[in-house]
Amino acid sequence: MSQATATNGSLWRRKSIESLQATDDSHALRRVLGPVNLILLGIGCTIGAGLFSLTGIAASENAGPAVVISYLVAAVGCGFAGLCYSELSSMIPIAGSAYTYAYATLGELVAWIIGWDLVLEYAVGAATVAVSWSRYVNSLLRDFGLYLPPRLLASPFETVKLADGSTAAGLINLPAVFVIVAISFLLMRGISESARVNAVIVVIKVAVILAVIGFGIPYINTANYTPFIPPNDGTFGHFGYSGIMRAAGTIFFAYVGFDAVSTAAQETRNPSRDMPIGILGSLVVCSLAYVAFSLVLTGLVNYKAMLNDAAPVASAIDMTPYHWLKELVKFGIICGFTSVMLVLLLGQSRVFYAMSRDGLLPGFFSDIHPTWRTPWRSNLLFMGLTGVLCAFLPISELGHMTSIGTLLAFVIVCGGVLVLRRRDPDRPRAFKVAGGPIIPILGILSCLALMVSLDGLTWVRLFVWLAIGFVIYFGYSRQHARIIQ
């Protein structure tokens, strides 16, 4: 018998790696991605809202110019988790990311928790980026004299200024909904097409980052760096060292890209070799970009001026005399956000595909389109869910919801490495984290520290979301799980 021989009623029944790989032809995805595609997917997803929008929010509300340190703190925790992801992805080259790893190591209940958590991570993450995408599109259109109705650019929880000077509550963020729908249809069309579009967008995005850094450095106002760590105002998380940690927890979801890379394992030509390259390669490139970019951004614009600004880079470019650069940079950022949403929605559909394939969700979510070879019904579902979120929620709330989901996934992956090493020490590992248990333990501790730094309301949202998930698990998933003996 396989490792999935626990009693059918056990909450901790596990699937062996062999059984996870035992999918029939009707559930086959195309293996077309190589290491370069994976690195580009990681960069495409990682460099986005965390850099172009949440940097301003984290600086103005939590860390000030020390948001640079927050990115370093997040990068360290992310590095530990990235190494653990690399080890597991080289051993378990199956779609589903942390969900699949948990099923093979920690059991069905933990797998369900992390799979349901990934819904929060990816769907809410895509919605967060869509809101900022909408703001930058509006900023670019205004540069060309085109004005969209302000109430169609904001959620009902936000106040907007009308043309006559009066204020009113927003109605719906219509451009954000539009881009989610367009990307979802692209993903349904095929992984090869999606990867090619992402590659083009990544080139544009990296060029924009280099342009902002290169042209922005001469116009940095060093007075904006004083004080570099603003004193705490008496509230935990509002500046000072606690503010640095709170900001690190908030922007941590910016590093979700390498997690999304692992969801594409079943569409990779040589996953045992290529997955670690894609995960760690994209993590290194993006960490360097975050530190350099945030340093320039907070030097161009005082952190106090970034309060509630979902498009801080546009404000930073306004501090330079390069008028031609403003529109170009905004266009590049819009393209960059598009690639982030593409990879997040790709990862989301693959997680649901894996959960459906294992019986934890209805089978139609793992149905593969006969021509496109994609889990198109999962794409349709999350087109609707993500569209509703970005239409009716403000960006600050979305960003906090996503961060805690990402951190929880990382904790479980790091724990999975420890469990699998003890339970199956002789299984070949194409990539193995050095140092014994040290790196996984540090990954768990660093991610837990960032989770603790988040506000109480964020924790409440997580528990409510998990409670909904438990209702579905005990009402449906536990009875329908396919345990291959």
Image (cartoon, grey):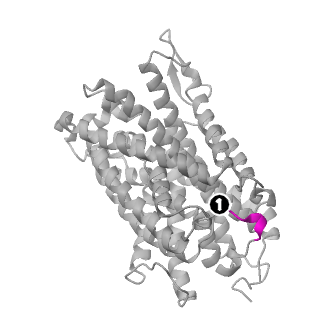
Q: Is residue 377 above or below residue 181?
A: below
The image quadrant where one finds the N terminus is: bottom right
* Apparent side of residue 242 relative to residue 357 in the rendered image (left or right): left
Indicate the position of residue 213 as horizontal and vertical percent values.
27, 41
User: Circle 1 sits in a helix, a strand or a loop, which is it?
Assistant: helix
| Quarter of the image where one finds residue 228 | top left
The outermost residue toward the top is: 164
Q: Nearer the viewer, residue 121 or 450?
A: 121
Indicate the position of residue 353 as horizontal and vertical percent values.
70, 60
Residue for point 62% across, 34% down: 177
Q: Nearer the viewer, residue 347 or 110?
A: 347
Q: Is residue 195 above or below residue 211?
A: below
- The answer, for residue 172, to whether it is visible in the render is yes
Mark 1 neighbour class, 10 Å CA radius: few under 14, some 14 to 19, many 20 or more: many
Tell me where the magenta segment starts and ends, as one range. 24-30
* Apparent side of residue 100 relative to residue 204 in the rendered image (left or right): right
| Quarter of the image where one finds residue 283 | bottom left
Q: Nearer the viewer, residue 115 or 198?
A: 198
The image quadrant where one finds the C terminus is: bottom right
Residue for badge 1: 351
